[in-house]
Amino acid sequence: MAYDPITRITVDQLSVRYDLQLERVISVREYAIRRLRGERFPSQILWPIRDVSFTVQAGESFGIVGRNGAGKSTLLKVIAGIVPPTLGRVEVRGQLSPLLELGAGFDMELTGRENIQLYGTLLGRRSRHLRARIEAIADFAELTPFVDVPLKNYSSGMVARLAFAIATDSDPEILIVDEVLSVGDAPFQRKCEERLARFRARGVTILLVTHSLALLTETCSRAVLLEPGRPCVVGSVNEIAARYAERTGG
Amino acid sequence: MNGAEATPGTYDRTPPVWGGPGAPGRYFDLLHNLVSRAIKQRYKRSVLGFAWTMLNPLMTMLILTVVFSAVFGAVVPNYPLFVIVGLLAWNLFSLGSTQGLASVVDSGALIRKVAVPKEMFPLAAVGANLVNFLFSLIPLLFVMLVMRVSITWAVLWVPVGVFLIGLFTLGVALALTTLNVFFRDVRYFYDAALLAWFYGTPIFYPIEVLSPRARAILQWNPLYVLVDVFRTPIYAGTAPAPAIVITAAIEAIGMAVVGWLIFRRYQARFVDYI
């Protein structure tokens, strides 16, 4: 595939704010009592993402590194359109397939076949298309004999394999990968890696979140390092890997 | 923390997640899957399965008939039929709005993890109850058969009534599910309100038994006309009065629009609260 010099992802001065008070469940009763007593509702503001900027070009593999709580998952959710940005600008150009929170939306009471339909349509695919792909998806997940068994009888590895197979059974231009390579056993992991490598060879833009510096340097050309309370750093993968190793004392 | 001059963040995606030319089809497929999941959940868990959907209104009808036919039987001919038609309309509304209310919070895990149009959840809750409602027309036909009430051409009005009740229910569900995201005890308040609403709607009593004053108050109950649009063609075998249909349509569309506006206004913030 010819190199298509367009910017797939633009993240421009992005900040995301969480209000911890908001996340507390408040009832009408509690609200009314506090109002009557004249109490305030103190809020605890948290900025999991503070002024982050980078761009990802078509065909590029871009890494996101940082310790737990540095805002990596939040950043991916903003790019995937799940969490709205508080400040700044995010632009995504191209068909995007998020491989994050795999299997969210599975119903354990339903069979593999029914879940392929349910999860697939949740990801925005057409029923007709999914029906035609059931065999291929079950085959990749190595679950063909179990496709009419309810998911509650699957092992957790089987569920994860099915989720990966459904999520990657598409023709994306951008792939968001969040540590999903830890799916299934070693042979299945190799299969997943092969599938990702094939996407990359086809010129699919990849956004990868990982704690593994080996995987990072092997896969990506550039990366961003997120650290709480510090400005983010964007640079070549070796530079970022070195910085990250230094920070984590690795 | 953030300066007053700061403009809110923007998110722009082409092709959009749930937009573009193929969007209606994708919405439809997702809705279909969510509705069929809700129905499967309902029937997989109970032993009697489908039978329960049909038995439940029959049993409630029997109880209400035993208790109230001495009071209202003289005023209302075919009292059991009068009751069951009203009950089915009421159940469609009360079950649809109750489940719609809970739908967004119950799907919280999903909403936090997948970019999915959130209005699909209340829509699916109301849709699933519409399907159940269709099954519960079987006991209704059974009662009509037993009571030898014939079906007339007026029955063509029934889909209009069902559609308007469904639309009204959806509007209520959209508004309440939004409120429930921010205040989790809304569902308990609503349960209590529903009980009062049930007694304030002519389901098991005819409006004629009320005093003129009570009747004037009842005009403000939107369900009164909505139930009437559904009940008259079946129970009386005549078309509902045009004024009633128009009022019902205005109420249903109005409620749907209001519910939708409330939902739209707050839905971006749901993800922080659930």
Image: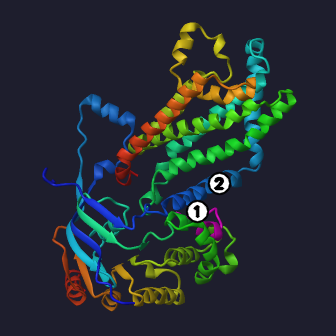
Q: State if disc 1 and disc 2 touch (CB < 8 Å).
A: yes
Across and down, in percent, residue B267 comes to 38, 49
Residue that badge 1 annotates: A107
Task: Report in which chain the residue with disc 1 lies.
Answer: A
**Taking B86 as reference, is B70 above or below it?**
above
Residue in front for this viewpoint, B84 or B257: B257
Across and down, in percent, residue A222 comes to 25, 85
Identify which amino acid the numbered label 1 is placed on.
Asp
Across and down, in percent, residue B104 comes to 47, 49
Residue neighbourhood size for the residue with mark 2, other residues' Cα within 10 Å, grouped as few (<14), some (14–19), many (≥20): some
- Using the image, tell me which numbered label, if any, was put on residue A44: none
Task: Report in which chain the residue with disc 2 lies.
Answer: B
Q: Is residue A189 magenta?
A: no
Q: Is residue B138 visible?
A: yes
Identify which amino acid the numbered label 2 is placed on.
Gln
Task: Look at the image and give the residue range highlighted in magenta.
Answer: A105-118
SS at mark 1 in the image: loop
- Using the image, tell me which numbered label, if any, was put on residue B41: 2
Give me the residue at 63% from left, 75% from top: A132
Q: Is residue B256 left or right of residue A53?
A: right
Give me the residue at 42% from left, 88% from top: A202
Give me the residue at 71% from left, 35% from top: B156
Q: Is residue A113 left or right of residue B154?
A: left
* Quarter of the image where one finds residue B149: top right
